[in-house]
Amino acid sequence: MSATVSHRISAQKRVLLSEGSSLSARQAVTALGLAGHQVGICDPNPLCMARSSRFATHYYRCPAVGKDPWGYMDFVLGVLSRGGWDVLFPAHEQAFLFSRERARIPNHIGLAVADFQSFRQIQGKAALVRTLQRLSIPQPASCVIRTQRELVRERRFPFYLKADYATASTAVWRIRNPDELAALSEKLALDAQWEGDREFVVQELAEGVLERVQAVFDRGNMVAVHQYRQRIEGLGGGDIAKLSVSRPDVRRYIERLGRQLQWHGALSLDYIVEKNSQTPLFIDANPRLVEPMNAVFSGVNLADLLVRVATGEQIVTAQPIGMEIRTHMLLMALLSKAAASKRRLDVVAELATAIAGRGLYADSREELLPLWIDYRCIFPLAYVLVRLLWNPGAAGALSAGTISSYSLSPDAARQIAALHPK
Protein backbone atom coordinates (compact mmCIF):
# COMPACT_ATOMS: atom_id res chain seq x y z
CA MET A 1 0.00 0.00 0.00
CA SER A 2 1.57 3.29 -1.05
CA ALA A 3 1.25 6.84 0.18
CA THR A 4 1.60 10.15 -1.57
CA VAL A 5 4.38 11.97 0.23
CA SER A 6 3.71 15.62 0.85
CA HIS A 7 6.98 17.48 1.41
CA ARG A 8 5.83 20.38 3.55
CA ILE A 9 8.24 23.27 3.08
CA SER A 10 9.03 24.83 6.45
CA ALA A 11 10.43 28.28 7.00
CA GLN A 12 13.99 27.64 5.86
CA LYS A 13 16.46 27.07 8.68
CA ARG A 14 20.21 26.66 8.58
CA VAL A 15 20.74 23.30 10.28
CA LEU A 16 24.15 22.05 11.45
CA LEU A 17 24.35 18.24 11.72
CA SER A 18 26.53 16.78 14.45
CA GLU A 19 28.00 14.15 12.09
CA GLY A 20 27.69 12.89 8.54
CA SER A 21 28.95 9.30 8.50
CA SER A 22 26.00 7.33 9.89
CA LEU A 23 23.06 6.02 7.90
CA SER A 24 20.79 8.12 10.10
CA ALA A 25 22.70 11.31 9.29
CA ARG A 26 22.62 10.59 5.55
CA GLN A 27 18.87 10.10 5.67
CA ALA A 28 18.40 13.17 7.87
CA VAL A 29 20.11 15.31 5.23
CA THR A 30 17.57 14.16 2.63
CA ALA A 31 14.63 14.65 5.00
CA LEU A 32 15.79 18.14 5.99
CA GLY A 33 16.48 19.11 2.38
CA LEU A 34 13.01 18.02 1.29
CA ALA A 35 11.59 20.28 4.01
CA GLY A 36 13.48 23.25 2.59
CA HIS A 37 16.34 23.52 5.08
CA GLN A 38 20.00 24.31 4.39
CA VAL A 39 22.31 21.69 5.90
CA GLY A 40 25.87 21.82 7.19
CA ILE A 41 27.88 18.84 8.45
CA CYS A 42 30.56 18.32 11.10
CA ASP A 43 32.49 15.08 10.66
CA PRO A 44 36.08 13.82 10.95
CA ASN A 45 35.85 12.07 7.57
CA PRO A 46 35.96 14.36 4.50
CA LEU A 47 34.39 11.52 2.48
CA CYS A 48 31.44 10.99 4.83
CA MET A 49 28.24 9.91 3.07
CA ALA A 50 26.11 12.87 4.07
CA ARG A 51 28.47 15.28 2.34
CA SER A 52 27.52 13.78 -1.05
CA SER A 53 24.17 15.52 -1.20
CA ARG A 54 22.80 18.49 -3.08
CA PHE A 55 21.22 19.58 0.21
CA ALA A 56 24.56 19.79 2.06
CA THR A 57 26.04 23.27 1.64
CA HIS A 58 28.84 23.33 4.23
CA TYR A 59 31.32 20.83 5.66
CA TYR A 60 33.55 21.19 8.73
CA ARG A 61 36.22 18.64 9.54
CA CYS A 62 36.12 18.04 13.29
CA PRO A 63 37.77 15.74 15.87
CA ALA A 64 36.19 12.30 16.30
CA VAL A 65 33.73 12.50 19.17
CA GLY A 66 34.57 8.97 20.34
CA LYS A 67 38.27 9.76 20.73
CA ASP A 68 38.09 13.35 21.95
CA PRO A 69 34.59 14.38 23.06
CA TRP A 70 35.72 17.64 24.63
CA GLY A 71 37.79 18.65 21.60
CA TYR A 72 34.79 17.80 19.42
CA MET A 73 32.50 19.91 21.61
CA ASP A 74 34.87 22.89 21.48
CA PHE A 75 35.04 22.58 17.70
CA VAL A 76 31.24 22.59 17.29
CA LEU A 77 30.96 25.60 19.61
CA GLY A 78 33.55 27.36 17.48
CA VAL A 79 31.53 26.75 14.32
CA LEU A 80 28.36 28.04 16.00
CA SER A 81 30.14 31.11 17.37
CA ARG A 82 31.05 32.24 13.85
CA GLY A 83 27.36 32.55 13.00
CA GLY A 84 25.35 31.31 10.06
CA TRP A 85 23.43 28.50 11.82
CA ASP A 86 19.99 28.44 13.41
CA VAL A 87 19.75 24.85 14.68
CA LEU A 88 22.16 22.23 16.01
CA PHE A 89 20.83 18.81 14.97
CA PRO A 90 22.12 15.80 16.96
CA ALA A 91 22.23 13.11 14.30
CA HIS A 92 23.67 10.42 16.56
CA GLU A 93 25.12 9.86 20.04
CA GLN A 94 26.45 13.41 20.15
CA ALA A 95 23.05 14.24 21.66
CA PHE A 96 24.32 12.87 25.00
CA LEU A 97 27.26 15.28 24.95
CA PHE A 98 25.09 18.22 23.82
CA SER A 99 22.71 17.59 26.70
CA ARG A 100 25.63 17.48 29.15
CA GLU A 101 27.05 20.74 27.74
CA ARG A 102 23.73 22.50 27.04
CA ALA A 103 24.71 25.56 29.08
CA ARG A 104 27.65 26.23 26.75
CA ILE A 105 25.53 26.28 23.59
CA PRO A 106 24.33 29.81 22.70
CA ASN A 107 20.69 30.47 23.54
CA HIS A 108 19.91 31.66 20.02
CA ILE A 109 20.83 28.21 18.61
CA GLY A 110 17.84 25.88 18.44
CA LEU A 111 18.56 22.51 20.02
CA ALA A 112 15.98 19.88 20.96
CA VAL A 113 17.65 17.62 23.52
CA ALA A 114 16.35 16.29 26.81
CA ASP A 115 17.64 17.24 30.22
CA PHE A 116 20.90 15.47 31.14
CA GLN A 117 19.31 13.59 34.03
CA SER A 118 16.63 12.28 31.67
CA PHE A 119 19.35 11.13 29.28
CA ARG A 120 21.09 9.20 32.03
CA GLN A 121 17.93 7.17 32.61
CA ILE A 122 18.05 5.59 29.13
CA GLN A 123 21.49 6.24 27.59
CA GLY A 124 23.17 3.22 29.17
CA LYS A 125 21.70 -0.25 28.74
CA ALA A 126 21.69 -0.87 32.47
CA ALA A 127 19.88 2.41 33.12
CA LEU A 128 17.32 1.53 30.44
CA VAL A 129 16.54 -1.81 32.10
CA ARG A 130 15.88 -0.04 35.41
CA THR A 131 13.77 2.68 33.78
CA LEU A 132 11.59 0.22 31.87
CA GLN A 133 11.09 -1.79 35.05
CA ARG A 134 10.11 1.32 36.99
CA LEU A 135 7.56 2.41 34.38
CA SER A 136 6.13 -1.11 33.85
CA ILE A 137 7.13 -1.11 30.17
CA PRO A 138 7.62 -4.73 29.00
CA GLN A 139 11.08 -6.10 28.22
CA PRO A 140 12.67 -9.55 28.12
CA ALA A 141 13.73 -10.92 31.49
CA SER A 142 16.81 -8.86 32.32
CA CYS A 143 19.27 -8.25 35.13
CA VAL A 144 22.24 -5.97 35.70
CA ILE A 145 25.57 -7.51 36.69
CA ARG A 146 28.95 -6.08 37.71
CA THR A 147 31.24 -9.08 38.27
CA GLN A 148 32.62 -12.03 36.37
CA ARG A 149 31.23 -14.34 39.04
CA GLU A 150 27.70 -13.14 38.35
CA LEU A 151 28.14 -13.84 34.64
CA VAL A 152 29.43 -17.38 34.89
CA ARG A 153 26.58 -18.62 37.06
CA GLU A 154 24.49 -21.23 35.30
CA ARG A 155 22.00 -19.59 32.97
CA ARG A 156 19.33 -20.59 30.54
CA PHE A 157 20.93 -20.59 27.08
CA PRO A 158 20.88 -18.79 24.78
CA PHE A 159 20.99 -15.28 26.24
CA TYR A 160 22.44 -11.88 25.42
CA LEU A 161 25.17 -10.05 27.25
CA LYS A 162 25.23 -6.31 26.63
CA ALA A 163 27.90 -3.82 27.65
CA ASP A 164 26.43 -0.74 29.28
CA TYR A 165 27.63 1.53 26.48
CA ALA A 166 27.88 0.34 22.89
CA THR A 167 27.06 1.52 19.38
CA ALA A 168 25.59 -0.41 16.43
CA SER A 169 25.57 -3.69 18.40
CA THR A 170 29.38 -3.60 18.70
CA ALA A 171 29.29 -4.83 22.33
CA VAL A 172 26.29 -7.17 22.32
CA TRP A 173 27.03 -10.89 22.46
CA ARG A 174 24.65 -13.80 21.92
CA ILE A 175 25.83 -16.67 24.13
CA ARG A 176 24.56 -20.09 23.06
CA ASN A 177 26.28 -22.55 25.40
CA PRO A 178 28.64 -22.87 28.40
CA ASP A 179 31.74 -22.97 26.18
CA GLU A 180 30.88 -19.62 24.59
CA LEU A 181 30.13 -18.23 28.03
CA ALA A 182 33.50 -19.31 29.41
CA ALA A 183 35.39 -17.93 26.40
CA LEU A 184 33.65 -14.55 26.53
CA SER A 185 34.06 -14.28 30.29
CA GLU A 186 37.79 -14.88 29.94
CA LYS A 187 38.10 -12.38 27.10
CA LEU A 188 36.35 -9.68 29.11
CA ALA A 189 38.66 -10.39 32.01
CA LEU A 190 41.75 -10.09 29.79
CA ASP A 191 40.39 -6.79 28.46
CA ALA A 192 39.94 -5.55 32.04
CA GLN A 193 36.22 -5.09 31.47
CA TRP A 194 35.38 -6.19 35.03
CA GLU A 195 37.41 -3.43 36.67
CA GLY A 196 35.78 -0.52 38.43
CA ASP A 197 32.01 -0.22 38.59
CA ARG A 198 31.20 -1.14 34.99
CA GLU A 199 27.82 -2.74 34.44
CA PHE A 200 26.53 -5.31 31.96
CA VAL A 201 23.02 -6.44 31.14
CA VAL A 202 22.10 -10.12 30.93
CA GLN A 203 18.91 -10.48 28.91
CA GLU A 204 16.91 -13.53 27.91
CA LEU A 205 16.34 -14.20 24.24
CA ALA A 206 12.98 -13.00 22.91
CA GLU A 207 11.59 -14.83 19.88
CA GLY A 208 9.65 -12.74 17.40
CA VAL A 209 9.80 -9.89 14.89
CA LEU A 210 12.07 -6.88 15.34
CA GLU A 211 10.35 -3.50 15.03
CA ARG A 212 11.30 0.06 15.86
CA VAL A 213 9.39 3.14 16.96
CA GLN A 214 10.51 6.76 16.56
CA ALA A 215 8.97 9.81 18.18
CA VAL A 216 9.54 13.53 18.61
CA PHE A 217 8.66 15.14 21.95
CA ASP A 218 8.18 18.74 23.02
CA ARG A 219 8.93 18.80 26.76
CA GLY A 220 7.11 15.56 27.46
CA ASN A 221 4.37 16.00 24.88
CA MET A 222 4.62 13.60 21.93
CA VAL A 223 4.12 15.54 18.68
CA ALA A 224 4.92 12.77 16.16
CA VAL A 225 5.43 9.01 16.08
CA HIS A 226 6.28 6.40 13.44
CA GLN A 227 6.85 2.64 13.54
CA TYR A 228 8.38 0.14 11.16
CA ARG A 229 9.31 -3.53 10.99
CA GLN A 230 12.65 -4.95 9.93
CA ARG A 231 12.00 -6.99 6.78
CA ILE A 232 15.60 -8.07 6.20
CA GLU A 233 18.53 -7.80 8.62
CA GLY A 234 21.88 -6.41 7.53
CA LEU A 235 25.36 -6.05 9.02
CA GLY A 236 25.43 -5.44 12.75
CA GLY A 237 21.71 -6.07 13.10
CA GLY A 238 20.76 -3.03 11.02
CA ASP A 239 17.93 -2.91 8.50
CA ILE A 240 18.31 -3.64 4.81
CA ALA A 241 14.56 -3.35 4.25
CA LYS A 242 11.67 -1.92 6.29
CA LEU A 243 7.88 -1.99 6.35
CA SER A 244 5.90 0.74 8.13
CA VAL A 245 3.46 -0.58 10.76
CA SER A 246 1.13 0.72 13.44
CA ARG A 247 0.80 -0.66 16.96
CA PRO A 248 -1.27 1.46 19.37
CA ASP A 249 0.18 -0.32 22.43
CA VAL A 250 3.72 0.58 21.36
CA ARG A 251 2.65 4.18 20.85
CA ARG A 252 1.24 4.25 24.39
CA TYR A 253 4.46 2.85 25.86
CA ILE A 254 6.77 5.35 24.17
CA GLU A 255 4.36 8.16 25.04
CA ARG A 256 4.48 7.05 28.69
CA LEU A 257 8.27 6.99 28.64
CA GLY A 258 8.55 10.43 27.06
CA ARG A 259 6.00 11.94 29.42
CA GLN A 260 7.60 10.50 32.56
CA LEU A 261 11.08 11.68 31.52
CA GLN A 262 9.73 15.02 30.25
CA TRP A 263 11.63 14.17 27.09
CA HIS A 264 12.52 16.97 24.69
CA GLY A 265 13.65 16.01 21.19
CA ALA A 266 13.86 12.68 19.40
CA LEU A 267 13.55 9.24 20.96
CA SER A 268 13.68 5.81 19.28
CA LEU A 269 13.09 2.36 20.76
CA ASP A 270 13.65 -1.17 19.44
CA TYR A 271 11.32 -3.97 20.43
CA ILE A 272 10.57 -7.61 19.69
CA VAL A 273 6.96 -8.59 19.01
CA GLU A 274 6.57 -12.03 20.58
CA LYS A 275 5.29 -14.69 18.19
CA ASN A 276 2.55 -16.09 20.41
CA SER A 277 1.36 -13.22 22.59
CA GLN A 278 2.13 -10.34 20.16
CA THR A 279 3.45 -8.46 23.21
CA PRO A 280 6.13 -5.85 22.40
CA LEU A 281 9.27 -6.43 24.47
CA PHE A 282 11.55 -3.39 24.43
CA ILE A 283 15.26 -4.12 24.08
CA ASP A 284 17.07 -0.88 23.22
CA ALA A 285 16.70 2.89 23.21
CA ASN A 286 18.33 5.62 21.15
CA PRO A 287 17.87 9.26 22.21
CA ARG A 288 17.82 10.43 18.58
CA LEU A 289 16.17 9.78 15.24
CA VAL A 290 17.13 6.52 13.56
CA GLU A 291 16.99 6.44 9.74
CA PRO A 292 13.95 8.73 9.26
CA MET A 293 13.20 8.24 5.55
CA ASN A 294 10.68 5.41 5.95
CA ALA A 295 8.71 7.91 8.03
CA VAL A 296 9.07 10.57 5.33
CA PHE A 297 7.69 8.20 2.69
CA SER A 298 4.86 7.37 5.10
CA GLY A 299 3.92 11.03 5.32
CA VAL A 300 5.63 12.37 8.47
CA ASN A 301 8.98 14.16 8.32
CA LEU A 302 10.39 13.63 11.81
CA ALA A 303 13.64 15.47 11.04
CA ASP A 304 11.73 18.60 10.04
CA LEU A 305 9.52 18.30 13.13
CA LEU A 306 12.62 18.05 15.30
CA VAL A 307 13.89 21.32 13.80
CA ARG A 308 10.53 22.96 14.45
CA VAL A 309 10.55 21.79 18.08
CA ALA A 310 14.11 23.09 18.45
CA THR A 311 13.04 26.54 17.29
CA GLY A 312 10.03 26.67 19.61
CA GLU A 313 7.28 26.23 17.05
CA GLN A 314 3.95 24.96 18.34
CA ILE A 315 3.07 21.73 16.51
CA VAL A 316 -0.15 19.80 16.12
CA THR A 317 0.49 16.07 16.59
CA ALA A 318 1.55 14.57 13.24
CA GLN A 319 0.37 11.14 12.10
CA PRO A 320 1.67 8.98 9.23
CA ILE A 321 -0.73 8.95 6.27
CA GLY A 322 0.61 5.79 4.61
CA MET A 323 0.63 2.25 5.92
CA GLU A 324 2.74 -0.73 4.87
CA ILE A 325 5.24 1.51 3.11
CA ARG A 326 8.21 -0.56 1.92
CA THR A 327 11.70 0.93 1.82
CA HIS A 328 15.20 -0.46 1.43
CA MET A 329 18.89 0.50 1.42
CA LEU A 330 20.76 -0.91 -1.56
CA LEU A 331 24.13 0.05 -0.09
CA MET A 332 23.49 -2.08 3.00
CA ALA A 333 22.26 -4.96 0.85
CA LEU A 334 25.50 -4.88 -1.19
CA LEU A 335 27.67 -4.77 1.94
CA SER A 336 25.76 -7.62 3.55
CA LYS A 337 25.92 -9.76 0.42
CA ALA A 338 29.67 -9.19 0.10
CA ALA A 339 30.27 -9.93 3.79
CA ALA A 340 28.28 -13.17 3.61
CA SER A 341 29.64 -14.68 0.41
CA LYS A 342 32.92 -12.84 -0.37
CA ARG A 343 32.03 -13.24 -4.06
CA ARG A 344 31.95 -10.46 -6.66
CA LEU A 345 29.30 -12.27 -8.68
CA ASP A 346 26.87 -12.13 -5.74
CA VAL A 347 27.40 -8.38 -5.42
CA VAL A 348 26.70 -7.90 -9.12
CA ALA A 349 23.62 -10.15 -8.91
CA GLU A 350 22.25 -8.10 -5.99
CA LEU A 351 22.73 -4.89 -7.96
CA ALA A 352 20.97 -6.40 -10.97
CA THR A 353 18.04 -7.50 -8.80
CA ALA A 354 17.72 -3.96 -7.45
CA ILE A 355 17.81 -2.39 -10.91
CA ALA A 356 15.13 -4.82 -12.08
CA GLY A 357 12.97 -4.07 -9.04
CA ARG A 358 12.62 -7.71 -8.04
CA GLY A 359 12.70 -9.48 -4.68
CA LEU A 360 12.97 -7.16 -1.70
CA TYR A 361 13.10 -4.18 -4.09
CA ALA A 362 9.63 -4.82 -5.53
CA ASP A 363 7.20 -2.04 -4.62
CA SER A 364 9.90 -0.57 -2.39
CA ARG A 365 11.63 2.81 -2.29
CA GLU A 366 15.31 3.56 -1.76
CA GLU A 367 15.70 5.46 1.51
CA LEU A 368 19.46 5.92 1.95
CA LEU A 369 20.67 7.04 -1.48
CA PRO A 370 17.58 8.11 -3.48
CA LEU A 371 19.09 9.09 -6.82
CA TRP A 372 15.82 10.50 -8.17
CA ILE A 373 15.78 13.01 -5.29
CA ASP A 374 19.48 13.70 -4.92
CA TYR A 375 21.78 12.95 -7.88
CA ARG A 376 24.93 13.29 -5.75
CA CYS A 377 24.02 10.03 -4.00
CA ILE A 378 25.74 8.29 -6.89
CA PHE A 379 29.17 9.05 -5.42
CA PRO A 380 29.04 7.00 -2.18
CA LEU A 381 27.18 4.23 -3.98
CA ALA A 382 29.81 4.07 -6.72
CA TYR A 383 32.65 4.21 -4.20
CA VAL A 384 31.34 1.28 -2.16
CA LEU A 385 30.49 -0.74 -5.27
CA VAL A 386 34.02 -0.33 -6.66
CA ARG A 387 35.56 -1.27 -3.31
CA LEU A 388 33.42 -4.41 -3.06
CA LEU A 389 34.09 -5.48 -6.63
CA TRP A 390 37.81 -4.99 -6.04
CA ASN A 391 37.70 -6.85 -2.72
CA PRO A 392 34.38 -8.26 -1.45
CA GLY A 393 36.04 -9.01 1.87
CA ALA A 394 36.33 -5.28 2.56
CA ALA A 395 32.65 -5.04 3.58
CA GLY A 396 33.31 -5.41 7.29
CA ALA A 397 36.12 -2.86 7.26
CA LEU A 398 33.97 -0.34 5.40
CA SER A 399 31.22 -0.67 7.97
CA ALA A 400 33.56 -0.53 10.97
CA GLY A 401 35.36 2.53 9.62
CA THR A 402 32.07 4.39 9.31
CA ILE A 403 31.00 3.54 12.86
CA SER A 404 34.27 4.85 14.32
CA SER A 405 33.63 8.26 12.76
CA TYR A 406 30.40 8.99 14.60
CA SER A 407 30.13 6.76 17.68
CA LEU A 408 30.90 7.49 21.28
CA SER A 409 33.44 5.00 22.56
CA PRO A 410 32.47 3.29 25.83
CA ASP A 411 35.18 5.29 27.63
CA ALA A 412 33.93 8.57 26.18
CA ALA A 413 30.34 7.73 27.13
CA ARG A 414 31.40 6.90 30.69
CA GLN A 415 33.33 10.17 30.93
CA ILE A 416 30.25 12.14 29.92
CA ALA A 417 27.91 10.15 32.18
CA ALA A 418 30.21 10.51 35.20
CA LEU A 419 30.21 14.30 35.11
CA HIS A 420 27.60 16.43 36.76
CA PRO A 421 26.00 19.15 34.63
CA LYS A 422 27.24 22.65 35.31
Image: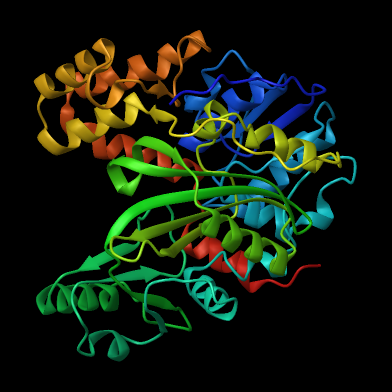
Residue 199: x %, y % from top left: 44, 78
Residue appearing at x 19%, y 32% in the figure: 337
Question: Where 284 sits versus 234, above or below?
Answer: below
Residue 287: x %, y % from top left: 60, 54
Question: Where 184 sits versus 107, above or below?
Answer: below
* Left or right: residue 52 compared with residue 87: left
**Quarter holding the N terminus?**
top left
Q: Which of 222 and 382 is in front in this view?
A: 222
Q: Can residue 58 be seen in this view?
A: no
* Left or right: residue 394 compared with residue 220: left
Residue appearing at x 58%, y 55% in the figure: 251
Question: Where 165 sits versus 385, above or below?
Answer: below
Residue 297: x %, y % from top left: 53, 26
* Left or right: residue 324 compared with residue 128: left
Q: Quadrant of residue 355?
A: top left
**Quarter holding the C terminus?**
bottom right
Residue appearing at x 59%, y 13% in the figure: 54
Residue appearing at x 48%, y 28% in the figure: 48
